Amino acid sequence: MDNPFTLTFGKEPLSIINRDYEINEVYESFISPNPDSHTFLITGVRGSGKTVFMTSIANTLKKDRNWIVCDLSSDFDLIKSLTANLNSKKEVFNIIKNAKINVSILGFEIGLENQIQANDVAVYLDKILSELTKKGKRVLVTIDEVVSNKNVREFVSLFQIFLRKEYNIFLLMIGHYENINCLQDEKTLTFLYRALC
C-alpha cells in the first residue's frame, strides 16, 4: 500500500486535508476588484500543509495572464530578489522597456532609452510596480518559512508603502506562529496584525 504522507518538503502528498474553503477565501480575496486584504499570513505546525496551501494558490494564479507570481526566500534581500524576479519575466521586461525606465544600480547602468532614471533598487521596483498596475497586472509575492529578519522587515516596510500607493501587489507569507508573531510585534510592522490569517 502507498504511504498517504510525504516526507518531501512542500510536495503535495497522495492524501491531504481538504482546505478548499480556506484556499478559496484567499484566492477570492486576491482576485476581487476591491480585495479585502492584500496580505495573508498563514501559520501552522510543522507538516500541517502550509507550503502546499501556498503553492496551490500560487499555481492557480500563475495560470492567469494578469498575474505575475514571484516566489522569494527570506534568506536573501527580498527587494533585490523581487526586482530581479520581475525583470526576468519577458512580459514584465517588455512593459518596462515600453515605459522607457532607465536605472543605475551599484554603478551599473541599465539603459532603456533614458526616459526615467532610478538610482536605487527600491525606486526602480516602485517604477516597475507602477507600470504593472497601470497595465492591470497583479503581482503575488510568496515567502515560505518567513522569519523576522532584516530582509523581511525591510521588504514588508516597503510593501506597506506600495499598498498606500495602491499598487496591485499582494503578499502571502507562511511560517510558524512564533516567527509570524515576532514579525507582527515589530514597532513599524504592527499593520500585519490586520493581515488575514
Image: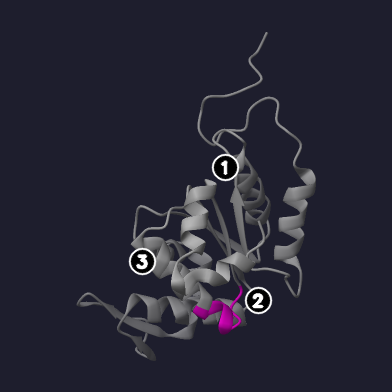
Amino acid type assigned to the residue bearing label 2 in the image: Gly
1 or 190, nearer to the observer: 190
Q: Residue at x 75, y 75 (%)?
A: 34
How far apart marks 3 and 2 lie (CA) works out to 23 Å
Q: Pick out the residue farthest to the top.
A: 1
Give the residues drawn in magenta, as a range. Answer: 161-168
Amino acid type assigned to the residue bearing label 3 in the image: Lys
Residue 194 lies in quadrant:
bottom right
Location of mark 2 (residue): 136
Residue 10 spot, x, y in % from top left: 54, 37
Location of mark 3 (residue): 80
Residue 44 lies in quadrant:
top right
Residue 30 spot, x, y in % from top left: 70, 64
Tags 3 and 2 touching, CB below 8 Å = no
Residue 181 lies in magenta, yes or no? Answer: no
Q: Is residue 164 left or right of residue 147?
A: right
Q: Helix, strand, or loop for circle 3?
A: helix
Q: Earlier in the sequence, mark 2 or mark 1?
A: 1
Where, quadrant-wise, is the C terminus in this rendering? bottom right
Amino acid type assigned to the residue bearing label 1 in the image: Thr
Q: Residue at x 60, y 78 (%)?
A: 133
Q: Helix, strand, or loop for circle 1?
A: helix
Q: Around disc 3, counting alpha carbons within 10 Å, would you say few (fewer than 14), some (14 to 19), or many (20 or more)?
A: some
Q: Residue at x 76, y 68 (%)?
A: 32
Location of mark 1 (residue): 51
